[in-house]
Image (tube, rainbow, N blue to C red):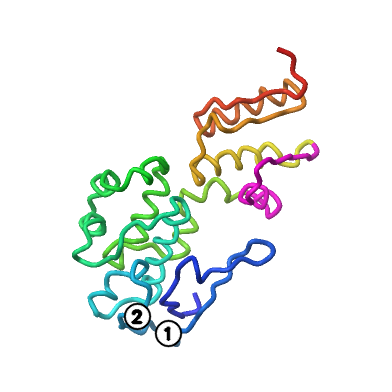
């Protein structure tokens, strides 16, 4: 990385350009934590309460990049649930105490019902727990995050395919030639909706022009998601 501690990473400080690429803003609290490839220990209580790493509440020296990784973990949770994972990472916070003590099952079971209904995938749960770990050394680096299993669904997609997968469309039409990767794109979209947006399988309808492609799609989706989705041929007669 650039060796800069942002110190206030939260959704309000992440902007999107016209191509939906994230851009970090507001560097008022930033600090340089690496010079000549040597990390400089950070200190300071500043930052937004529910995005701050526990070390910043304890007013002890901490690693700059691992503090920002913690904030990104909270952002990840917010993106998939629209709620905060805990009020703060203080010692007296009931929710974060379970994370600090590595009581994963207890933590997930004590969350409010509105979070329980999202049915988060094991992959995103595991990644979140790693990113907000109490011990800095237990938090992954950015490269390790990008190599995590949770990203496997989109890792092999090109930019055009990725745009189709993650962009928010109510209805989506995919038109492409043979061998262009349209089935991969459609399956990627389905997995994104199921795992990242917590859609119910019965709310997804796929339409195809031929029985052969509908059959292939049904088999592929079943293999990669374990779900039997509703897949129909256009103009199909009952």
Q: Is residue 203 above or below residue 100?
A: above
Residue in the foreground of this view, choosing between 78 and 161 = 78
SS class, disc 1: strand
Residue in the foreground of this view, choosing between 139 and 238 = 238
Q: Give residue 12's position: percent from left, percent from top.
A: 50, 69
Residue at the far bottom in the pictured view: 36
Image depth: mark 2 or mark 1 in front: 2
Q: Is residue 199 magenta?
A: no
Q: Is residue 160 magenta?
A: yes
Residue at the far right in the pictured view: 177
Q: Residues within 10 Å of mark 2 (few under 14, many from 20)?
A: few
Q: Give the magenta part as a residue range.
A: 157-177
Q: Residues within 10 Å of mark 1 (few under 14, many from 20)?
A: some
Find residue 192 and report its image quarter.
top right
User: Which numbered disc, 2 or 1, marks the residue that appears first in the sequence?
Assistant: 1
For mark 1, what is the residue? 31
What residue is at 65 percent from the left and 67 percent from the top? 17
The chief SS type of the magenta part is loop
What residue is at 66 percent from the left and 46 percent from the top? 169
Q: Is residue 6 above or below residue 103?
A: below
Q: Across the whole image, how many numbered discs are drawn on residues?
A: 2
Q: Which mark is residue 114?
A: none
Q: Give residue 146's position: percent from left, percent from top.
A: 49, 58
Q: Give residue 187's position: percent from left, percent from top.
A: 61, 37
For mark 2, what is the residue? 46
SS class, disc 2: loop
Distance from Cα at disc 2 to Cα at disc 1:
11 Å
Q: Give residue 4's position: percent from left, percent from top.
A: 46, 80
Find residue 128 and report its image quarter.
bottom left
């Amino acid at each position: 990385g650039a060796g800069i501690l942002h110190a206030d990473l939260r959704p309000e400080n992440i902007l999107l350009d016209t191509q939906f690429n994230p851009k970090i803003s507001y560097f008022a609290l930033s600090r340089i934590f690496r010079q000549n490839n040597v990390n400089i220990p950070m200190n300071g209580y500043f930052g937004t309460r529910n995005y701050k790493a526990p070390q910043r509440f304890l007013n002890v020296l901490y690693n700059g990049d691992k503090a920002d990784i913690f904030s990104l973990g909270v952002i990840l949770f917010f993106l998939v649930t629209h709620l905060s994972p805990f009020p703060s990472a203080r010692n007296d916070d009931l929710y974060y105490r379970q994370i600090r003590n590595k009581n994963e099952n207890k933590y997930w079971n004590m969350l409010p019902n509105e979070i329980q209904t999202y049915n988060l995938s094991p992959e995103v749960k595991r990644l979140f727990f790693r990113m907000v770990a109490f011990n800095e050394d237990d938090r992954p680096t950015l490269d390790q995050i990008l190599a995590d299993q949770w990203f496997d669904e989109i890792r092999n997609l090109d930019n055009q395919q990725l745009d189709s997968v993650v962009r928010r469309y109510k209805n989506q039409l995919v038109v492409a030639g043979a061998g262009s990767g349209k089935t991969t794109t459609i399956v990627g979209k389905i997995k994104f909706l199921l795992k990242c947006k917590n859609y119910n399988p019965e709310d997804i309808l796929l339409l195809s022009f031929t029985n052969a492609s509908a059959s292939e799609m049904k088999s592929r989706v079943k293999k990669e998601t374990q779900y039997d989705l509703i897949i129909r041929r256009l103009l199909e007669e009952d």
